[in-house]
Image (cartoon, rainbow, N blue to C red):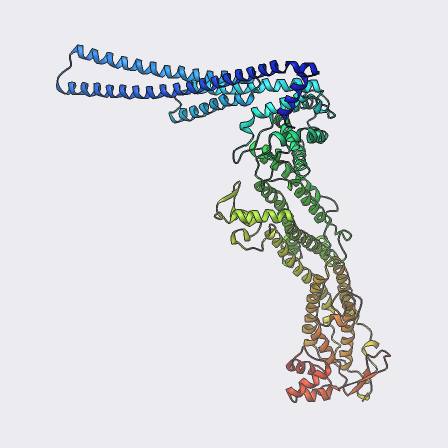
Amino acid sequence: MSGQDARVEDFLNDKFQTLADLDTLDSLLSTVQSQQSLLRSQLEAAETEVQESEDRAEELSEQLIFQAELFQQDQENIDRRIEEEEAGVVLSEETQQVARELRESADKLKRLNIAKGYVEFLQLVCALSDEARKQIDVNNPKAALVPYNKLQHLSKDLRKRHEETEEAAVHLVDYVERTSRELWDSMKEKLSGEMQAILKKMGWPSTTLDVKKYPEFETAFVKLLDLQEPELEPAAGEVSPALLPLEVMVNPLALRFRYHFEGDKQTNRLDKPEWFFNHVLSLVEDYTPFITTNIQPLLDQYLPNSSRDAVLELITAVLPMLRRRIKNLLPSIVPHAQLLSHFIHEMIKFDTVLRDEYLYAPYGLDADALWKGLTHEVLVKDDWFWQWLKVEKDFALTRYQSIIGADDAWQIDYDSVEDHEAKPTKSAIRLKDLLETITDRYRPLTSFNQRLRFLIDIQISILDQYHERLNSSVEAFRVLSSTIARAVQGTSREEAEALKGIPGLERLCRVYGSSMFLEACMRDWGEDVFFLELWEELQSRSSNHNKDEQLSGHLTIQDIADKTSSAVVSGEDDGALFDETAGAYKTLQHRTEEMIIHHIANSVIEELRAYSRITIWSSIDPDSSSSSGTNHTHTPSSLTLSPEISQPLSTLSSSFSFLARALTTPVFLRIFRHTMANVQTYLYDYIVSRNQFSELGARQFGRDCQELWAVSGRFVSESGGIGNAGVAGSDVATRRLREAVTLLTLPVEESLVAGSGAEGDEKRKVPGLRSVVGVVFEDNEKARRVLEVLGVEALDVMEVRGLLRRRVEAWA
């Protein structure tokens, strides 16, 4: 049942309470018809009067224009005649006096006509205002809107003409606009007062009211909607203000809010903005059932084409009291960084709740647009963003300094990541947590520029500083480990010792593990939906601008590309926000990896120098001539390891053991191969290529090399991964050395040696040295066949011949 039907029903129930009341039906009907006729005649008279006033104003305006044109013509004729007289003869005194009087009369008449126009215009304004007030007094807000809208139209048109004529009617414009405002305030105040009286009678703001018991509530509600009708459908790009009836209903709630949070109560605390934000959210939650049950049907009935949500309209009505509180609070907390930061984050949380839980957006906002929230109003419209950004950056940098300044900042954390991952330092892990916390802080922001500035000014800035710290550590290691630099700078013995062995290796692994860990984090962040959306918007905006144009504050597109990714200016599709920073960390990894290889290899080679000075390799085995066709007594396994190689092997073992735990498998294997290749090169160049070997000397060298392969083989399995088994996995890195040992340890004559069978009792035939020499030096093709039998693949024929010449028995 509509509101009008309900009122008719109430009227009939009031007039006809018994059967006897039906006798008065004719007189009642006659009275109603008389009242209806009277109201209709009053309305028609008012409309006629307004129309006549407008017609008179228009007629008067046309007359003024016509008379002004006539006066202008007369003025021109007089001026022309005066000029002709002056050009011919001198005018008489009497003629000049007449001309002056005519000019003065024309000016007076012009001013009088202008004044008359002013008066008649003001009479029209007053008539429209009086008519609107009259309609409000008879509870007809829709009829009151007719003269009010005309008054508004006159006011806007007058303002436009006023601006076109260089503000020639300041007082008139001010009067008309003030009259329009006062009329609106008067109409609004009268109808709002009526509704407030009804709400007080109902017991509002109770949430358990039964609105159906108070039909006058609906009447008052609809009157305010009728009064607000011109504002209910906002123009494109604008949003609707709060509904007037809901504004009236919110007044007691706003009074309660001011009592708690704008007075001298303990609830009004600068350091607890979450209290009043949560209070507003509680209000919305508490009154949602009442609003949904009682207000939503009224909106659906009287605003059927609006599709307004009553709960969202309630939120729109309560936000002004929050805006007032925020505006008053900000000047007090801006000087205090901690308070400002806390306040902004609480406001962001409040906006997020309204957007995510209530799907709030003011009526009139585009369907695909997102409500930017109170945060946008404060940070952008009121321009507090840069102050807040500075506060957040200072907090982040302070936290960063505490991270890198901690006593355990540069300790490797073996427990924070999986066993197969590179081990970062504790500072890297804490830095990751800090950066992710910063992301969570500005993730809810809706402004692209604000997000971008947080990314560049805080996160990338901190990552750059940490990279510089790691890079400086590597550079210091390089300088201190250089012999020339130590001599020039006077490095102390303690500093030099700290760079040797495992301590030096650990220092490099701190940098490598931390840089690898953070680079992986940046790659993962680049795939996060939040950063992907930011990247796509950056690409979209940069594609429409020149690279030297400013895009965010003073930052040009090229500046942003230098901080994020070159794809911003190149237009590539496979970029990400952290490309440049992650690339810098990747470069640091490569450099550190090379230094790790160089450090281990140099440490081992330095300790191998004593081994390279051994000169007994050519000693003749006294039993070598008596063993023909049988295995020799001095097999490699029966020989004792050379004392000079024990320390290098220990260093190699401890280094590989440390690296296997600190680095990923692929990285360790890469370092392992390069290190063993360096060791192989040293042994080949300084021992194999510089000495003559007897069979005993060669077997001693082979024994030492077998220990080298056994030590390294503990870290590399046959499959190429880190494991327990076999020396075969290390063959790839030292194949040339192994083949050299095979050739140098050939028996003088063909022999049977123990095979590799499961039982260990199988024998295999090994060609004799002299027979191999004969074939290798005879023909290249035959040489390749015999080398294939021996399993020699990495060495070419010329290298093999050079090796065989180093056996003293080869030509004996």
Identify whether 3 is placed above or below 474.
above
Horizontal side, residue 780 vs residue 146: left or right: right
Residue occupying image coordinates x 27% and y 19%: 71
Viewer-proximal residue, 498 or 39? 39
| Horizontal and vertical percent position of residue 803 | 69, 80
Viewer-proximal residue, 711 or 306? 306
Residue, far left: 89
Residue occupying image coordinates x 69% and y 88%: 775
Residue 478 lies in quadrant: bottom right
Residue 65 lies in quadrant: top left
Horizontal side, residue 641 vs residue 532: left or right: right
Locate the C terminus and report the quarter of the image it occupies: bottom right
Identify whether 762 is placed above or below 711.
below
| Horizontal and vertical percent position of residue 265 | 72, 21
- The answer to whether any part of residue 170 appears in the image is no
Locate the N terminus and report the quarter of the image it occupies: top right
- The answer to whether any part of residue 607 appears in the image is yes
Horizontal side, residue 146 vs residue 535: left or right: left
Identify whether 738 is placed above or below 30.
below
Viewer-proximal residue, 65 or 12? 12
Residue 189 lies in quadrant: top right
| Horizontal and vertical percent position of residue 788 | 70, 83
| Horizontal and vertical percent position of residue 107 | 29, 15
